[in-house]
Image: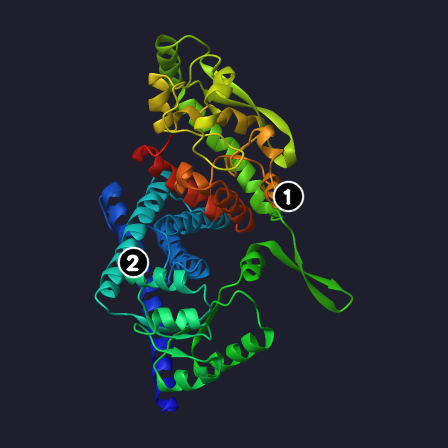
Amino acid sequence: MSPLFLSKRNKMSTSKSIFNTGLTIIQLILSVLIFFGFYYALFDTVMLPQDYKVLLICLCFLWPFLLKRLDISKVFRINPFSYILFRYIIVFICGTLGLIFLIYLLKLDINRTFLFWFLGIDLVFLYIFIISVYHYAKIQRGKGKYTNNILIIGDKHIGGFINKIENNSLWGYRIKGIVTDSPETIEKFKNRYPTYSIESIKDQLLKEPIDELFYCLPSMDTKLVSDLVYMCLELGVTFRVSSQILQLARNKSTIYYLGETPFFTFQNTPKQSLNLFIKTAFDKVFSLCVLFVLTPLFLLLAILIKIDSKGPVFFTQTRSGLRGREFTLYKFRSMCDHAEDMLDEIKAENEQDGPVFKIKNDKRITRVGRFIRKTSIDELPQFINVLKGDMSVVGPRPPIPAEVKEYKPWQTRRLSMKPGITCIWQVSGRNQIPFEQWMKLDLQYIDTWSIGLDFMIILKTIKTIFKHDGQ
């Protein structure tokens, strides 16, 4: 029976390849149509001059290369729309720079208005197209189509992962069995899924049309994982491993050679020099733009704060920054004057665990303060801190020095990256999250940091602001 399944898997792999190639071709055709359409709208003709024909030919080679290079020509089962948008923006930045280089290299006479408007419109249309494809695929998976059959290897802690698969039917995964020797897991899921032993995995892969095998054991059994990898490669099954060390290795490791012996080298902070430079440059430019655009709002808030209660417009506080360096943080004042002096009176009402202090109905908050906290507008002056270099747009929130003194040793690692105005904690429930989980989210951000992650957090923060999720 195994040759039949191998043939089926090969056909599925070929079908996916054809589908992805088709997506690339459709996006290229769409770009060409937009090119002609916008040229007609601007010049009232579709007859392209020689220079525009050369530009179009360059586009036909450059676009497929960039789409495939950044994996935008593939539809993944789980991919946030904000991440897809980020990828498209990268494609169009690279594409724009590439086309400009070719224009100057080949000395093409191209209207700049046409070029930049075409690129902007093309970005919007291609993004709408690929999101529509994702949306259609999700609807079909919800109906039971385009699903992948999976086996899960786990122990007594696997219940959470199984529930996540069950609660996200749009991912398109069907659990065909659980491989475990845990009596608790067998008892809990025996009426929902068949359970197997490690020794019987190969038999099940040959008997059942299994597409993917998930390894979710907390410890890495090197021999077992090695055997499973070769087994899945032999049978054409996708093998996935969930492991903290692999999650770290994705972004936090390098190969270091001592003589001819390779070593995985781990560092607890990002060392991607170019990406960190881009992050810093973005922080400065973005903060400058925000402060310039929102100057009228700053003036309006200053007036409202002064009318609402006595005291200064801005609230300043000493916070701990990168590796414990202290700096002055700026916020719009949302509490009555001398609120810090009243802290001892209400400490018993603290609703947050750990060394931090937060209560929902703080009597020190003013009327204007309640609104600007709900919308997180009180945080806007921190863009001044970003310009000064004390903070970043995205990063772990800066703690008070007194809180840092109560940190456990592992929690101090959150100070190994420059603090930010927003972070994963800000968009994941904020004050509903226990202190220890908050710390773990910050470390997760540090361990998996990328420019794409920052972009997604910024988009989610904007959504959170409009939902009035602040406190």
Say left or right for 373 vs 139: right
Q: Residue at x 37, y 64 (%)?
A: 162
Where residue 283 sits: x, y (%)?
51, 34
Nearer to the camera, 116 or 398: 398
Residue receiving disc 2: 134
Q: Is residue 119 above or below residue 54?
A: above
Do residues under tags 2 and 1 come within 8 Å of each other at their CB atoms?
no
Displayed quadrant of residue 325: top right
Where residue 104 sits: x, y (%)?
49, 46
Where residue 328 sits: x, y (%)?
57, 22
Mark 1 residue element: helix
Q: Amino acid at mark 1?
A: Pro
Q: Residue at x 49, y 13 (%)?
A: 338
Q: In this rendering, does residue 389 appear at all?
A: no
Q: Amino acid at mark 2?
A: Tyr
Mark 2 residue element: helix
Where residue 156 sits: x, y (%)?
45, 66
Q: Which mark is residue 143?
A: none
Nearer to the camera, 443 or 234: 443
Residue receiving disc 1: 409
Residue count near mark 2 (Cα–Cα under 10 Å), binned few <14, some 14–19, many ≥20: some
Residue count near mark 1 (Cα–Cα under 10 Å), binned few <14, some 14–19, many ≥20: few
Displayed quadrant of residue 196: bottom left
Q: Residue at x 52, y 38 (%)?
A: 396
Lower sequence index among marks 2 and 1? 2
Say left or right for 263 vs 154: right
Q: Residue at x 24, y 51 (%)?
A: 46
